[in-house]
Amino acid sequence: MAWVLSGLALPHRLLSRNPFHGCDVAETDFFHHDDVVAVLTTQPLDRVLDYRAPEGGCFAGAFVEVPLGPRKVIGVVWGAGQGAVDPSRLRHVIRVLDAAPMRAEMQEFIHRAADYTLTPLPAMLRLATRAPGLGDPPAMRRILRATHTPPSRWTDARRRAMEVLNAYGGLALTLAELTEAAGVSSSVVKGLIKQGSIVEEETPRDRAFPHLDPARQGKALSEDQAAAATALCAGLQSGAYGTTLLRGVTGSGKTEVYLEAVAECLRQGRQALVLLPEIALTAEFLSRVEARFGAQPAEWHSGVTMTERRRIWKMIGQGGAQLVVGARSALFLPFQNLGLIIVDEEHDTSYKQEDGVLYNARDMAVLRASICGARVVLASATPSLESWANAEAGKYDKLVLTDRYGAAVMPRIGVIDMRSESLPSDRWISPSLQQAVNERLNRGEQAMLFINRRGYAPITLCRACGHQIGCDHCDARMVEHRFLKRLVCHQCGDSKPIPNACPACDAEDRLAPVGPGVERLSEEATSLFPDARIATLSSDMHGTARDLKAEIEAIAAGGADIIIGTQLVAKGHNFPLLTLVGVIDADLGLQGSDLRAAERTFQLMRQVAGRAGRAEKQGIAMLQSYQPEHPVIRAIVAGDEEGFWRAEAAERQQAGVPPYGRMAGIILSGPDMQQVFDLGNRLARNDVALRRIGAQVFGPAPAPIARIRGRHRVRLLVKADKSAPLQGALSQWVGQLKLPAQVRLAVDIDPQSFF
């Protein structure tokens, strides 16, 4: 469900008065039977609801089931009741759920995050209750324990099974765990159960995670790494909030450094959270955690089963999970004693949620840590300009790792001037790059060809009439995915078979793909390097995270000669044999009017180049460019990161845009384009609330993709000084607008994209 503004009136969060703030959890910690309590539900309502406490009472923050009309819904006891309803008319809380109560610091985090992002509080609560079956009774499972009764007859298989059980010191195992560890069949174990040598027991399925041992020896650190790790640990020992920007070149060992901070956090008995930008990074990272601490942590992302999600959510609240590795939504888990948040690859755009509740996990991590007195580590080789500026201003501590770990050295970066290359119109790998790839193949090394486009071709064009096949529901061209034999819209996900005839003029066999995607590049590489083993990595080409993990592990072990990849390959993977990275269309991200275009291109190119030469042999990155004299390309080649950031910061400061100013995006959408535009114009004309704080309004204008899923989209952009009280002015400004039933309004504080 997308939490946007719709209907006849705007929800409470965009009104000047906030009715939720009337509930003060500090008034009492426990409510007795029949006391009036305020319950916040996840339903899209504009207020908390008063109920009577159940028999036995309930704590503030308790997760409860309450009646709402004919339904039963989940909610949280938010504080004392407001008393607006006659107590005799109030219904009772049905029951208190078997879950640790929400801590006051979590309630404050939800409140402040909702206030900052201008999100209805029930929508924010939904992020904090993303565990299926919270109201279900505890799920049970069968476990096996050894007894002191020997079997009547010993066999090798029986002996192995009993030795495994005894080796675990009395800990219980499931049937599957025991058979796998002992290498025996289930019939062997069942025979031991009949003999009385093993007993079956029922136990709750929601169990604590294996203990992580911070005393285990980690990898030997270099002098710079050890100094950085010591500084991070000192911050944790202070017991006070603080944020540190851990900046290190690709391959400098940032992960090993912040794992030492995790170890210190665990030694203090506190919980730690590591955020990763992509699910594809999780498997490799989990292996490193297991090597460091002797067990795997809790794992939270979209690929986790519903049963495991429920277990993780409950165990975190009970203190049964020391470390969580997860995607951005893990920030809203009910940590009991959070001491450390790591945001790995903190610059990554996937930390910004672009639908539903619009928030940036990097910023929310800092907010949550400041509330609970935790430390934050923002780790990146190419930090966001926001984090760089905060470190320069002294708001964040800064640690810098300048060298790669061990014998590895930074790759050399060069530019191939495509204006001087002789290349057919249907080819994209230049002769110079082709020669460099062949040299690596002859030496038994790996090469990577990178292009930041999924699919086969971004445009399918009719050569008879010029028609470009677009999505039926969006103002976007459909992307050809030849491996799937379909055209796919990357905005709404709609797809259709690749037609034989033009849908506009019916001309047959005149449709042609225009431009390269990762699949087309793979096809070209197969033609140019027929004897090479080619692996193609793209987020939409692997059915499951497990398949992707297996593919990456095989490549790292030398299972491919050439890697063809999209942005997926730029994020944290280590391919020891890779010594050449070739970038197709290095200029691609410099096009358009996005104020972060230069920053993102610089980050992506530096990250991709950093995949090369991470072992003993020095690598090289070759950027194919039609604009080799562009300042961003020149900065990438020169490796002048500080120079680039200072130049970019100066431009942003002069323009008064983030991080030296504030911005908010307003997106109006609806089925009637004229109606949406009229509403946008009405907002733009009645901007008194914004002018009072010195803010400017730009627009309305059609969004770059003006129609998605059949809804027309109009954008307005608000720009204000850094110190301006933007949220209050925005609330008053949009609060004057009465929305028709089919129109939605979304407010995006600190927009990261402008599509």
Image (tube, rainbow, N blue to C red):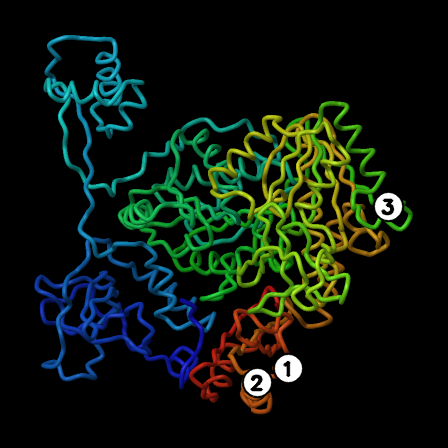
Give the farthest residue toward the right: 420
Three-letter code, disc 3: Leu
In depth, the one of 435 and 78 nearer the eye is 435
Three-letter code, disc 2: Gly
Residue 36, placed above or below residue 413:
below
- As drawn, is 368 to the left or to the right of 520? left
Q: In which quarter of the image is the C terminus?
A: bottom right
Q: Residue at x 62, y 55 (%)?
A: 498
Q: Where is residue 93 in the image (x, y as percent from the top left)?
A: 15, 68
Q: Quadrant of the N terminus?
A: bottom left
Whole-Å distance between the Cαs marked 1 and 3?
43 Å
- Quadrant in the rendering for residue 16: bottom left
Three-letter code, disc 1: Gly
Local secondary structure at mark 3: loop
Say which label, 3 or 2, has the lower sequence index.
3
Q: Where is residue 159 in the image (x, y as percent from the top left)?
A: 23, 12
Say which label, 2 or 1, has the lower sequence index.
2
Q: Residue 699 bears which disc, if any?
A: 1
Q: Residue 400 bears which disc, if any?
A: none
Residue 481, placed above or below residue 562:
below
Is the residue under label 1 in contact with that under label 2 (CB below 8 Å)? yes
Q: Where is residue 415 in the image (x, y as percent from the top left)?
A: 83, 45
Would you name the residue on which mark 2 appears? 680
The residue carrying pointer 1 sits among few (fewer than 14), some (14 to 19) or many (20 or more) residues within 10 Å by Cα, namely some
Would you name the residue on which mark 3 appears? 423
Say which label, 1 or 3, has the lower sequence index.
3
Residue 248, placed above or below residue 496:
above
In depth, the one of 747 and 268 nearer the eye is 747
The residue carrying pointer 3 sits among few (fewer than 14), some (14 to 19) or many (20 or more) residues within 10 Å by Cα, namely few
